[in-house]
Amino acid sequence: MRGDFEAYLNDSFRDKNGKLDLEELLALEDEAEMEVAVIMPNTQPEPPNAELAEAIKGNPRALGCALIHPTEVDPISKINQAADTWKMKGIKLMPAVHGYNVDDEIVRPVVEAARDNGLIVSIHSGPGNCHPTRIGNVASWIPETPVIMDHMGFPDDLDSGIEAAKTNKNIYLGTTILRFHQRWGTNPDQVVPTEIKKAIDELGPEQIVFGSNTPEYRPIQVVNAIQRLELGEEAETLIFGGNLARIYGLND
């Protein structure tokens, strides 16, 4: 089983009538032989979770992930709706977009509600309000719930991302890092992401999960970059889907 933990069904996937086109996104996943993808909405102040839910409804390859803003009115009801009405499988926190410290006490009931609804928690990492150490604090509140750290703390503090995952075994580091290499002028079709290798060397492949950040990058570009690390079949099987299947209970 192969899967992508982070794909955005955003405005670039609208058809001529303005509707979100899931099949166009899944065609990109097909290039990389990804059987399932965790689908997230546009990252904006008012997350269009309802529109996302309608676009992916009934498609077993699409695992919905609601973008939750903890400082909005009644975020707990949004989580309950995501789980009960929309049948989503996770939530995403974007402190860099919504402007809060991810380990602020206002966030605790949000991630606890996700836990109580059986939802996986994904968190954007970066400097300041979403530093990996802060994400480690969040993970410690819900040790029984998987927490996926988008970008692995890279490029600001990969070491802290790795350390947070060492301390909190429910943290998984996501491979969504090609965007930073491109900013430095490296062709994403040539990059060798040694940062991922470093994380694997220190944590083992069991805590690394494949993510593409589609449509910013095609999944096949990220797959090819990781394969240039020559990790071996066992590690690749875990990273390209085995870990995601375990996190989301896809083998149950």
Image: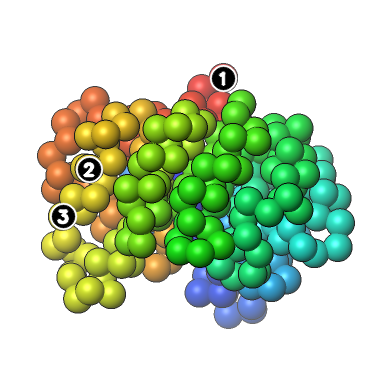
Q: Where is mark 3, residue-wise? A: 192
Q: Nearer the viewer, residue 157 or 149?
A: 157
Residue 69 x/y as whole percent? 71, 61
Q: Crowdedness of circle 1 by 10 Å Cα count: few (<14), some, many (20+)?
A: few
Q: Amino acid at mark 3?
A: Val
Secondary structure type for disc 2: helix
Q: Residue at x 56, y 19 (%)?
A: 252
Residue 130 x/y as whole percent? 53, 58
As drawn, the label of residue 252 is 1
Q: Tell me the quarter of the picture where residue 72 sits.
A: bottom right
Q: Crowdedness of circle 2 by 10 Å Cα count: few (<14), some, many (20+)?
A: some
Horizontally, residue 71 falls left or right of residue 201, namely right
C-alpha distance separating marks 2 and 1: 31 Å
Q: Earlier in the sequence, mark 3 or mark 2?
A: 3
Q: Earlier in the sequence, mark 1 or mark 3?
A: 3
Q: Nearer the viewer, residue 153 or 210?
A: 153
Q: Crowdedness of circle 3 by 10 Å Cα count: few (<14), some, many (20+)?
A: some
Q: Nearer the viewer, residue 53 or 91?
A: 91
Q: Amino acid at mark 2?
A: Lys
> Can see residue 209?
no
C-alpha distance separating marks 3 and 2: 12 Å
Q: Earlier in the sequence, mark 2 or mark 1?
A: 2
Q: Amino acid at mark 1?
A: Asp
> Can see residue 91?
yes
Q: Residue at x 69, y 66 (%)?
A: 47
Horizontally, residue 117 falls left or right of residue 209, namely right
Q: Check contact, mark 2 vs mark 1: CB within 8 A.
A: no
Q: Where is mark 2, residue-wise? A: 198
